[in-house]
Amino acid sequence: MHKKISLEDAFYENLTLGLIKTLSTVPRVCNVSLERRQPLNPCQVVNWEQRHCVYLPEDMKKFYLSTDGFVLHWSYQYSPTDVRRVGYIHFPHLLQVTLLRENIETTPLVTPSPSSTSSTSSAPVTAPISKDKWDNPLPIITAKTKIFEINNINEVAKVCMLYDSTSSNNPKFYLLELNTLTWQFLSETFSEYLRMAIAHLGLPYWELCFSSFGLPSWTEQLFLLLAPHLLEKNEQRRGRTINPACEHPYNILDPNIFRSKPKGTTKSSTSIAKSQNK
């Protein structure tokens, strides 16, 4: 008889899309662990929004009302006596999502020449939109832009959530390369960023796949061993859906993960946590 899965186990299995079980079956991958956290209550989310004068996007709000972030670790056995913790997926506590400290310059303004427009207005406008190496538009930074740090990637880059203005509730996610303070596009939504982390198995520094300087050589070796399909030379890394090989079913991702309750769940995650604490 199969052991009945608890509501909490079911939630995290759905949240990670079965990644924990799958990693446990991969040769040489061991010590897979997940740090579980209590959900936030609505007041805590509202307090964060009021402190920073922005609204969390709906999918991110539902995530933090289900669990205040999480950390997933796994190790790789290079030899019988050499086991190293390398795999890492980290979503911080909401209180740790803070404004970026780096001094980011605003996008320069240009004044249109009289010959280029018949309009009587000569007000400055933003420069033409720049694009990254995958032809994704780069952010336009203005005085109204708010940038929050989500993750620090080996002190060479940061994953950032960028609001065009305080009235927006649809921030996008970018990689900021710290050496040059240049931007690389990552995802349109929080849910997409979460799915990308899972699709890349939490391989170390996976976000640097999308950087201008690429992965460290030792990390690239792990990609070649565990997920070579993510390093295809001619693969368009943006503007596409990751279509993994059939032997990797954990990469078939459900875009509605936060829109429905886990199978067999009739209570909200918050009420589940309260009942467990009684």
Image: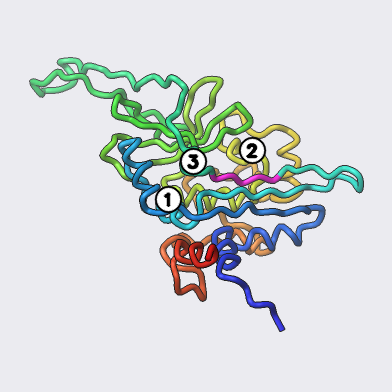
Tell me the magenta residue range: 87-91
| Label 3: which secondary element | strand
Query: Dot 1 corresponds to which residue?
Result: 60
Image location (x, y in percent) of residue 39:
48, 55
User: What's the CA distance linking mark 2 and mark 3?
Assistant: 13 Å
Q: Nearer the viewer, mark 2 or mark 1?
A: 1
Say whether residue 194 is left or right of residue 34.
Answer: left
- Which residue is depicted at the point 34% across and 36% down? 51
Q: Is residue 221 above or below residue 268?
A: above
Q: CA distance from mark 2 to mark 1?
A: 22 Å
Residue 112, disc: none
Q: Which residue is mark 2?
A: 205
Please give the count of numbered marks on the rendered protein.
3
Task: Give the residue furthest to the left.
Answer: 120
| Amino acid under disc 3 | Leu
Q: Helix, strand, or loop for circle 2?
A: loop
Q: From the top left corner, tell me how far across and down residue 47 is, in percent.
A: 35, 43
Residue neighbourhood size for the residue with mark 1, other residues' Cα within 10 Å, grouped as few (<14), some (14–19), many (≥20): some
Reply above or below: 8 against 97: below
* Sooner in the amino-acid sequence: mark 2 or mark 3: 3
